[in-house]
Image (cartoon, rainbow, N blue to C red):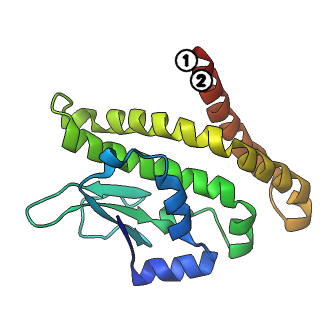
Amino acid sequence: MKIIITEEGKYELDRLKFDIKSSIDNIMKYIPDKDVVGVSHIIISEVPPKKKNIENKARASYTQKHKMHPARIEIYLKNLFAHIKNAESFAMMLPIQESWLAQVIYHEIGHHVRVTRTHRIKKKESEKFADSYSDNIYSIYILDNAEAINSCFNYLESVAEEKGLNLDTVNNMREGWMRSYEEVIAKSRKR
């Protein structure tokens, strides 16, 4: 699968000093090959195009194959990383940011799986199916990357005052992370 970066996306990646291709390569290792058959590429852009029927705040979108146009996923960096002010703060939170990117990609691949491999799930159930698909793959990702994410939160807490980070924001992010992590641990114990 190709990764295509638009000119605007390139500017945003340069601003963040983010090697998104290597992050996506790592994220895609958790996806079974059969689930991405037919997805031609991932487009990295700054914001959703105005001409499409995509919500302005969308972090990503999936477009299914249509005539000669292959299926694709688009990622909108400004919406996904709107809270990041500069490259230094992005680098400090890289494992956390990558986990959010992973969740978004898994969700969009869930839409592709629904379109290409299910016939009984109606379009109105698409979001529910994509969320369920994402949760299953993301659970494995979480277990493999929990140590790096927890270390990242510990680091952020230790440098919050020095770096001018809002400790309440860091703690709120950590609470959300811990809920996800604890849910995954509970599910894995039931298996």
Query: How many angstroms separate mark 1 from mark 2 (CA)?
Result: 5 Å
Other residues around mark 2 within 10 Å, as few (<14) / some (14–19) / many (≥20): few
The 10 Å Cα crowd at callout 1, few under 14, some 14 to 19, many 20 or more, is few
| Horizontal and vertical percent position of residue 41 | 32, 65
- On residue 191, the disc is 1
**Quadrant assignment for the N terminus:** bottom left
Q: Are marks 1 and 2 in contact (CB under 8 Å)?
A: yes
Q: Nearer the viewer, residue 81 or 134?
A: 134
Give the secondary structure at mark 2. helix
Quadrant of the image occupied by residue 116: top left
- With 74 as the anchor, is 167 left or right in this view? right
Would you name the residue on which mark 2 appears? 188
Amino acid marked by disc 1: Arg
Horizontal and vertical percent for residue 33? 35, 49
Q: Which mark is residue 29?
A: none
Q: Position of residue 150 (x, y in %)?
A: 76, 45
Can residue 58 be seen by looking at this rendering? no
Q: Residue at x 78, y 44 (%)?
A: 171
Q: Residue at x 17, y 27 (%)?
A: 120
Asked whether 157 or 148 is in front, the reply is 148
Against 145, residue 18 (above or below) is below
Apparent side of residue 95 relative to residue 43 in the rendered image (left or right): right
Kindly tell me whether residue 3 is visible in this rendering: yes
Task: Report the residue at 41% width, 84% height from top.
Answer: 7
Give, as a three-letter code, the residue at label 2. Ser
Check the picture and name the quadrant holding the C terminus: top right
Query: Disc 1 on helix, strand or loop?
Result: loop
Q: Position of residue 118 (x, y in %)?
A: 20, 34
Against 46, is 98 above or below?
above
The quarter holding residue 68 reads bottom left
Locate residue 11 relative to residue 7 in the image: left or right. right
